[in-house]
Amino acid sequence: MMKLIKKQSSFKHILLCICLFAGINAFADEVEIDGIWYNLVAKTKQAEVTSKSEGYSGVVNIPETVTYNGVIYDVTSIGDEAFYNCTGLTSVTIGNSVTSIGNMAFLDCSELTSINVEVGNTTYDSRNDCNAIIETATNTLIAGCKNTTIPSSVTCIGDYAFDECSGLTSITIPNSVTSIGYAAFLDCTGLTSITIPNSVTSIYREAFRGCSGLTSIKVNTDNTTYDSRNDCNAIIETASNILIAGCKNTIIPNSVTSIGDEAFRGCSSLTSITIPNSVTSIGNMAFFNCSSLTSITIPNSVTSIGNMAFMVCFSLTSVTIGNSVTSIGNNAFSSCYGLTSVTVGMKTPVSIFPYTFNSSAATLLVPAGSKSAYEAADYWKDFKEIVEMAPLRGDVNGDGVVNISDVTTLVSIILGQEPLRGDVNGDGEVNISDVTTLVNIILGKE
């Protein structure tokens, strides 16, 4: 039995060596031919275009075949990130033999002005001289440039299609497009306006993230999936009332119930935003890296603030959080190094994480009667100072705001329907004169 085991082990060792030898010979060393680097597959006589350490620049023509040591190889693929960050690349032509283009192959080629696939290629095309690469079978535009014109036969703008194309200033999305892929226009900082046609039924996350130059976002009024109601300069998912993408000129309509994940992420030119009291939740990373945002007021309608919702908002100095919040996510206000004051309306501190706030240099203002609770609460107690706010004059129902609901409560008290309280004018009695005073407070007359 021992000899048999040893023999089997030796056989496995020999087999492993054969496999390793075969693997070594399957790929030659990376070689440069006429300024382009390739991986050469000896067994299949195929070549893959790969990245170049110093990057490609100028004009690149990818041929159908290359010859190395007398052997002809078909150029069949362009590898992952082959032209990534080639900011000096201006023009690329893809030969007929290419059947595979890797992920993010042309990412961040900001000066690319011409993309052309030769007419005989059966997998990809650049129909109508569109200056883009289109996957022929699916009509998906997979890579574009600042001079791209999207043909009316394209049905999908693929993931990362224009990612970091900072030279792109305008683009028309034709009515044939039904889907805009993940990060399709990520960090297109030169893009100033976008119109979504009525044909689009799906927009994936981060489609317009980091488009800091955007001033106008519109959805065609005939679109049944998305809208830009009230000329809000944003994209709203109609059925759910979730705002999924905004810009520096966005005005959030008071029918929006949620600010979606990453809706304003990377909007570095956003300086202020009003969140209406229709909003009940703020998504993960909703305002991540809105580096010019100086203050934010979260209304009483909001119950949850997502993870990293306002993280890396360097200019943020003051935050006001309404009284209905029951959940604040991890790192929600982390790396907001300019933060000096946080005002909360919750009388009972909610659970937070160690890095929810940059609290060591900020003052925490809390409702009357709640200071001791915050001083004892984990991570809230780490604020530089905790200050108890004076009771709000006219806040009869104790919700932290003075509005018409306080009038309703006060009338109920006068009628004996609620416990006696609400001496708004301080005359020692609760009567109709307190209602008059309260209305004047609401109207700003007192």
Image (cartoon, rainbow, N blue to C red):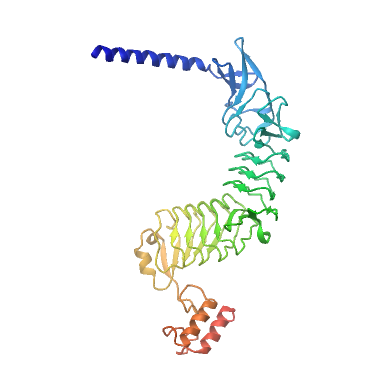
Residue sticking out furthest to the right: 128
- Quadrant where the C terminus is found in the figure: bottom right
- The x and y percentages for residue 219 are 68, 53
Nearer-the-camera pick, 80 or 154: 154
Decide: is 5 above or below 326.
Answer: above
Residue sticking out furthest to the left: 1
- Quadrant where the N terminus is found in the figure: top left
- The x and y percentages for residue 287 are 55, 54
Quadrant in the picture for residue 173:
top right
Count the marks: 0
Residue at (57%, 65%) from the top-left corner? Answer: 276
Can the viewer see residue 446 in this picture? no
Quadrant in the picture for residue 380:
bottom left
Residue at (62%, 37%) from the top-left corner? Answer: 108
- The x and y percentages for residue 358 are 45, 55
Decide: is 154 above or below 434.
Answer: above
- The x and y percentages for residue 107 are 61, 35
Residue at (44%, 59%) from the top-left corner? Answer: 327
Decide: is 162 above or below 60.
Answer: below
Nearer-the-camera pick, 210 or 143: 143
- 223 with respect to 316 (left or right): right
Can the viewer see residue 18 in this picture? yes
- 370 with respect to 394 (left or right): left
Decide: is 268 above or below 387.
Answer: above
